[in-house]
Image: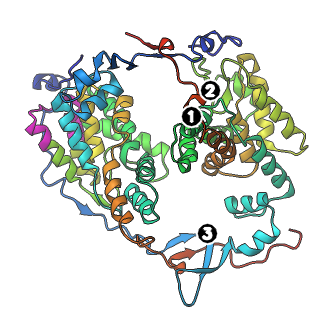
Amino acid sequence: MTILCRSVATGYLQLIGLNNPTKTMNKNKQSEQTKGDAFTQRVPTNIWKEQGSPSNPYIATKAYCYGYDFDEVIDQLSYVDSLYLMLTGNLPTSEQSSLLELCLKLFMTPGPRHPATRAAMNAGIGRTHVTHILPISLSVLSADYLGSTEVGNAMKFIQQHKNKDAKTFIESGEIAIDHSSPNPIPGFGTIYNGLDQRTLKFVSKVQSLNCEFSHFNWSQSFVLGLVKYRLSWLPTGLAAALFLDLQLDYRTGTCLFQMMQSPGLIAHGVEKANKPLTDMPFVNEDNYVIQK
Amino acid sequence: MSYKNKDNVEQWDRLRNKIESKKGGWVIGDAVYNHGYRMMQDLVGSSSYFQVLVLNITGRLPSKNITKWLEASFICLSWPDPRIWCNQIGALAGTIQASCPSAVSGGMLAADSRMYGAGTMRACMEFIVKAGQQANKGKTISEIVDNELALKAKQLKSKPVISGYARPIASGDERVTAMQRVGRDLGFSVGHHENIAIQIHNELHEKYDDGINVAGYCAALLSDFGYTPLESERIYATWVNSGIHACYAEAADKPELTFLPMRCDDIDYHGPTIRKLPKSQ
């Protein structure tokens, strides 16, 4: 085994133009001093206001979401519209409402073969405290490929390039397509060497809304130009385009994708939570190969 | 592996329900193997936990001195102070009786940050490796610093800073002094990257009143130890965990909701004025 060691000769450092090695920093430079930042005493927010009880200011008697009485929101708005309000501060148009509802359905589950769902099932079968199933699987779903980080990156990519002609943009060579990666462009690529047929079906469902979704339309043109490279939509790319058309920023989109995928993660994790250990594969001795 | 070939599933079929590992694994009735070591016989009792941690990540068993230094660097980020963001997550979990694993894993995720903790290590490493290469090509410390600041100024809207050479809340970093002392006590000589890091610190301090922080210093040492940025990021993934334990434990041992309680008017609302939902809704 390699034992690492560190020693660099003074002569070498002189040779490369640096001063003699020294452990000495200029005197007193590491003595700590507060920067005296002016931190707020109360927590500022544009989202939520609570009215405290006169007898106990820690108990809220009324709450407002972006200025709307939350009791009225509960009584009068659909879940989808309330969600849009919470995420953006605005009430959605009917188009936005339909699109958000469709997204909630399209991205309800990554399916039982996705590593995040399998993490949920592993937690379930391993008798992990059931309250951890969702955080565990969402941590896995944070991924750069087929995960929420990819959604945010794809949102930034589409936002950055959406004003360019998609076909010319691809032919310009501005983006280098790395075939050693399944997602050479965030949100666009392959799954198991193939094009993701499920996401292509989802695309047609979005088209059936018959709405003008500019980011979605640009991304669809972009995908048509990618065909000759054998790349296409990934679910993350579709989510990214639609989130931009919902006027969400990339940070909200990253987090919303996790929330949207949660029902499937919960369902598959909980399904395994009280099953015998043998209800999930455990690779047998013959198939566990320790390589030299 | 290439993703270009049309629906070539051979590489996936070969690995269905099969694991191939260069790391090791459990051979029931024989041993648990770890990079050729039998863990119970060769490592337990003779190696430190940190040696095995690094072995697991890199495949190389480091010297005891390196891991003594590494363990000391973990102590540097193990403060029992719940004002620190990751630690406060531990305390918030404690004050409503979440489990300790929830608190600690949540706090560790919080330190996957661009500003502090394990999340900064990759960028610190990449900078010091680049600086080392530039120095080898004859660039002066001034040029290295100016180039990096110019690059950062293009990427950021806020004041450009070099990864590993800034710190929130306070200036100066006594953890660096402590880690230098540990290295000296262990008999380490000054390596190429440490030397450059110190000169960069001096340059930044003279010109901008910034200075090296513990992550920047650890990155330099890890580069000198021979670890890559990716390996270092993995080694430090759990860097802050023990401070979170402390803050969780204290809050969980006190009555519920007593950690930094907030009145309704401790929320400073700046949103739209109170309004009615439109009738059409």
Q: Judge by depth and name the residue closer to the eye, B232 or B34.
A: B34
Q: Quadrant where the C terminus of chain B lies?
A: bottom right
Does label 2 or label 1 sit earlier along the sequence?
1
The vertical placement of B243 against A139, above or below, is: below
Q: Residue at x 23, y 40 (%)?
A: B71
> Which picture quadrant has residue A225?
top right
The answer to whether residue B114 of the structure is visible from this angle is no
Q: CA distance from mark 3 to mark 1?
A: 31 Å
Query: Dot 1: within a 10 Å radius of its alpha carbon, few (fewer than 14), some, or many (20 or more) residues?
Result: some
For disc 2, the chain is A
| Count of picture labels | 3
SS class, disc 2: loop
- Whether B188 is among the magenta residues is yes
Local crowd size for mark 3, using a 10 Å CA cut-off: few (<14), some (14–19), many (≥20)? some
Q: Is residue B90 magenta?
A: no
> Which labelled disc corresponds to residue A183?
2
Residue drawn at the location 70% of the way across and 64% of the way down: A89
Say which residue appears at 34% left-offset and 39% top-offset: B236
Label located before the other in sequence (3 or 1)? 3
Residue A186, percent from left and from top: 63, 32
The residue that disc 1 covers is A144
Magenta-highlighted stretch: main secondary structure?
helix
Magenta segment range?
B181-200
